[in-house]
Structures are given as C-alpha cells and as structure tokens.
Amino acid sequence: MLGLSVPHIIFSELLPNITSYIAINFIMIMRNAITASVGLMVLGLVPFSSTHWGMMLQMAVGTSGAMYGSSAIIYLLVPIIAITLFQMGCLFFANGLDEALNPRLRTQ
C-alpha cells in the first residue's frame, strides 16, 4: 500500500527487530548441543576422545572411583566446573547480545 519494496521491508523493518532473537537462539542451540555431546560421551555412545569433558567425567566415575573416594574427587569436579562456567558464559553472552541488539531494550 505504501509502495515499499520487499528488500526495504525485510532489511529496514523486520531484520532489526528479529536480530536479537536469532542470535540468542543460535547461542542457546550451541549450548544445548555441547551439553548433549557431553551427555552422549558420558554414556559412551560416541567415539573415544580423551580431551572431551564427557570422557573426563566417565573416566573419573568409572576408573578413579571419584564417587566413592575423596582423593579422586578433583577429577570429577574439574569437568563439572568447566561445563558450569561455559554454560554461565553462554547465558551472560546471550543476555548481553539481547541488551545490545533488542530495539525495545535500547534507551532513547
């Protein structure tokens, strides 16, 4: 009705309003994919990789007995703390992107 072209509508009206949602969803999908990868590695359903957090957890529980002895608890806590810090970092990054890119949150 106004005679606006399709690229103008997409790039001037739609894209600035959905950019933050696209970025946040990408970060959350990435976070969930890494968590699923760790879960699959703990269960032993993927090929062996000694530097994977899931394998570190599996080896800590299965080999060193970290669940039963206090001397090997560090082998269990280090991957758990790394995963927790990674998850928190992803959430803080998504929150920062939302504040930076969401036009409704920008101060005038």
Image (cartoon, rainbow, N blue to C red):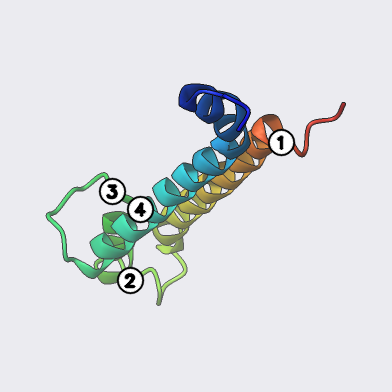
Vertical position of residue 35 compared to residue 103: above or below? below
Q: How far across and down, in percent of the image, does residue 17 sit?
A: 62, 36
Q: Which residue is mark 1?
A: 99
Q: Which residue is mark 2?
A: 65
Q: Nearer the observer, disc 1 or disc 4?
A: 1
Q: Secondary structure at mark 3?
A: loop
Q: Nearer the observer, disc 1 or disc 3?
A: 1
Residue type at mark 1 is Glu
Position of the N terminus, as image quadrant, is top right
Q: How far across and down, in percent of the image, does residue 7 sit?
A: 47, 23
Q: How far across and down, in percent of the image, does residue 102 sit?
A: 68, 36
What distance separates the C-alpha of mark 1 from that of mark 2? 44 Å
Which residue sits furthest front? 1
What distance separates the C-alpha of mark 1 from that of mark 4? 24 Å
What distance separates the C-alpha of mark 2 from that of mark 3? 19 Å
Q: Quadrant of residue 51?
A: top left
Asked whether disc 1 touches disc 2, contact meaning CB atoms under 8 Å apart, the reply is no
Vertical position of residue 61 compared to residue 9: above or below? below
Q: Which residue is mark 4?
A: 33
What distance separates the C-alpha of mark 3 from that of mark 4? 14 Å
Which residue sits at x=65%, y=39%? 98
